[in-house]
Image (cartoon, rainbow, N blue to C red):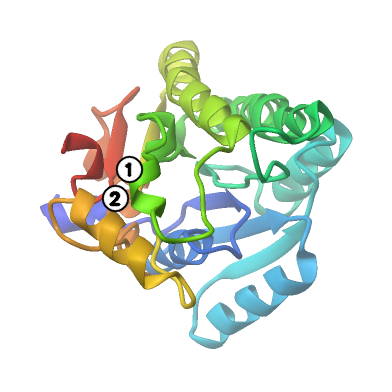
Amino acid sequence: MHVLETFALNGRTALVTGGAGLYGRQIVESLAEAGAQVFVASRSIGLLEEVAGQMRADGLNVCALCFDQGDESSVLALRDEIIKRAGKLDILVNNAVLRPMKGFDDDASAFAESMNVNATGLFVITRAMGDVMAQSGGGSIINIGSIQGMAGPDPTIYRGTNMSGWVPDYFFHKGGMINFTRFVASYYGSRGIRCNCVSPGGFLTEGMPQAFVQQYSDRTFLGRLAGPADLKGIITFLASDASLYITAANIPVDGGYTAK
C-alpha cells in the first residue's frame, strides 16, 4: 500500500464529542475529509446542527447528535444510536469539555460539576464506545488534552490583561487524561484498539488582548498561537492506519510551548 493511502479513512465510522468548539470543528472536518462517516455529539445540538450542515454542504458525511457526557444514560443512548445507524465504531475522539470554574476561589460545587463531566463522563464514554470498537475488531481512541495537563500555569503570559490561568479543575482533569490514556491503551490493546492523547496549545481568537498574544507567542518556538488547521494532520494520522504501531502516547501540538 502506498504510504498516502494509509492515511485514508474511507469506510470508517467516527464519533467526535464536543465538535462545535475551537478545536472541534477542525477535528470533525479532518476526519470527514479523509473519508470517514463522522458523528459529532454534544449538548449544544443547535450549534452542532449548523456546523454539520455547513460541512454536508461541502460534501462531507457529518451528522449531529445530542448527548450529555455528565449523564450515563445519555452516553449509552448515543452508543445505541450510532450502532443503529452505522453498525460499528472505528474512531472515538474525546473532545468534549465543560469549563464551570472561572477561578481558584470558586465554590467547590463547580469543581465537582467539572469532574462529573470531564473525569467520570470521560471514563463512561470511553468504556461504552471502547467496548463497541472491540466488538468491531479494533480502532483508535484519541483524547484531546491540553498543555495545561503537562505544565503548571505561567502567570507571566497574562501580564497586562484581565486573564488568568487559575482554573484548578482544568489542570486536574487534563493531567489525569494523559495517564488515563495509558490505562486505556493497556486495557484495550490486546483487542486491537490504540489510545493516544493530543495536547494542544492555545488557540488564537478574535478579541484576545494583544499583550497576551505577544507574551504567549514568545513562550513558543514558532512564535504564534494555534490556528484553525493545526490539529488536522495529527488527528488524521492517529485515526488512520498510518499510526498502527503508536499507542499510549501524549503528543503536544503547541508550537514548542512545553519544550521551552
Left or right for 166, reference 77: left
Q: Is residue 104 above or below residue 205?
A: above
State the residue in front, 167 or 44: 167
Residue 172, position in %: x, y?
A: 55, 25
Residue at 53 percent across and 51 percent down: it is 14
Point out the image quarter for the C terminus. Answer: top left
Can residue 227 be seen here? The reply is no
Residue 85, position in %: x, y?
A: 72, 55
Which tag is nearer the camera, tag 1 or tag 2?
2
State the residue in front, 22 or 259: 259
Spatial separation of the CA atoms under disc 1 and disc 2? 6 Å
Disc 1, disc 2: CB below 8 Å?
Answer: yes
Which structural element holds mark 2? Answer: helix
Residue 68, position in %: x, y?
A: 80, 45
Q: Farthest residue in the bottom direction?
A: 57
Left or right for 167, reference 45: left
According to the image, label 2 marks what residue? 234
Can residue 49 be seen here? The reply is yes
According to the image, label 1 marks what residue? 238
Which structural element holds mark 1? Answer: helix
**For mark 1, does the 10 Å Cα neighbourhood hold few (<14), some (14 to 19), or many (20 or more) residues?**
many
Q: Farthest residue in the right direction?
A: 73
Q: Is residue 8 above or below residue 45?
A: above
Left or right for 237, reference 187: left
State the residue in front, 135 or 169: 169
The amino acid marked with disc number 2 is Ile
**Rendering quarter of residue 105:** top right
**Rendering quarter of residue 192:** top left
